[in-house]
Amino acid sequence: MKAHTGNILDYKTYSYLNVNEVGVEGTEVRGEEQASAAEVFKEYDYGISKEMVELHDTSSTIAKQYNITCAKDLGVHRLDGDEDEIVTLDFNVAENARLTGYFASRKKAGYRSALVRIHVKKNAVARLYFVNMDESEVANYLSLGAIVEEGAKLDCYIFHMGDGDETSSVKCYLKGENALGNIQSIYLGKGGQSYDLVYDMIHEGIDTTSNLVVDGALMDNAYKVFKSRIDFLEGSKHSRGNEEEFAILLDSTARSLSVPALLSHEDDVEGNHAASAGRIDQDMLFYFLTRGFDEKTAERMIIDAKFAPVIDAVVYENERAMIYEQLETILRRRENVTA
């Protein structure tokens, strides 16, 4: 195992919270194929750590670069396998181009680190889905960096639905005027699982818009640390940022810690952020119980409704059905958990 530094909080908070730094371990794997250098990202901070990014740039076992110049649907890609993997995916979306693609993982064992770099150029649109359904033995790491240019739009959907521990860093830079970044994610923690999640939206250009929604459910000794930031840099006048994170605690053993931040180096900007954690709404639960549903079924229906907007955004019908099936499988475990 090769040790490296995990997610580091750019803005330090109280030390007793123990969220400023998180230590993780990774496997060093050598592969013949190396990731192509993404020159545009050299001046940007992204990834779980610099060491992790360097590992990908020198030792990827899978490396793919997608250069999109027109309207292109990449379809569904499976990143399965039983071996340790270091996966690097680079997306270069040219001016006025359109990109759609779905990348899913369902490993049974091993280790996976994924580095994803997305560059959406002027007036281009990219819609990408990243889905983790790995099993319990799999440690999963995601480093995602995105740069969105003038008039461009990025829709990115991330599903943390595997059984193993996850460490993820997602950073989106809204570089050009009128750039739009929409990142939505769901997670389901169970079986002592732990999440270390960082989601950042950085506004560079004037009149940019960000929307960040990360919602999840935790049960059975699951633990989550969520660190997020909306940052309005100098020069980002008239920009808007929205951030939401909500954790449903399905039993008393689940733990959730959130550190949201709203930073501004500009005036005339609008920022909203909210983070909360709690049990299922009792009034809503009572409503379903009075309609004849048992408590566990009612809970699943409420969570389904909470996650539906993100899942329904998946344009691939079979994959959307598979995500709902995985959600149902996970929530059925609730029947064997004591509140």
Image (spheres, rainbow, N blue to C red):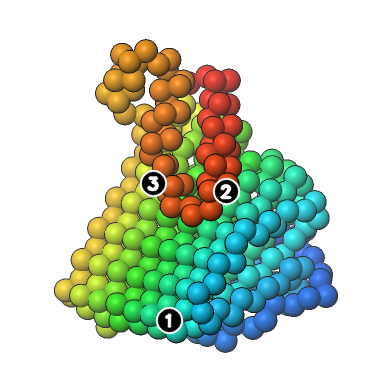
Residue nearest the viewer, comparing 315 with 195:
315
Say which amino acid is labelled 3. Pro
Which residue position is annotated with label 2?
A: 319
Which residue position is annotated with label 3?
A: 309
Q: How many marks?
A: 3
- Residue 158 appears at what percent x and percent y? 51, 55
Say which amino acid is labelled 2. Glu
| Residue 93 position (above or below residue 247) | below
Can residue 272 be seen from the camera position used here?
Answer: yes
Q: Is residue 125 left or right of residue 204?
A: right
SS class of the residue under badge 2? helix
Q: Is residue 93 left or right of residue 137?
A: left
- Residue 174 appears at what percent x and percent y? 37, 75
SS class of the residue under badge 1? loop
State how far apart marks 1 and 2 are (Cα). Answer: 27 Å
| Residue 199 position (above or below residue 92) | above
Which residue position is annotated with label 1?
A: 96
Residue nearest the viewer, comparing 298 with 337:
298
Quarter residue 304 falls in:
top left
Q: Which mark is residue 142?
A: none
Q: Nearer the viewer, mark 3 or mark 1?
A: 1
Q: Is residue 284 left or right of residue 314?
A: left
Say which amino acid is labelled 1. Asn
Q: Specify which label sits upstream in the sequence, 1 or 2.
A: 1
Quarter residue 336 falls in:
top right
**Circle 1 crowding by C-alpha within 10 Å: few under 14, some 14–19, many from 20:** some
- Residue 55 appears at what percent x and percent y? 70, 72
- Residue at point 68%, 48% (across, down): 106
- Residue at point 37%, 13% (across, down): 292
Q: Nearer the viewer, mark 2 or mark 3?
A: 2
State how far apart marks 2 and 3 are (Cα). Answer: 15 Å
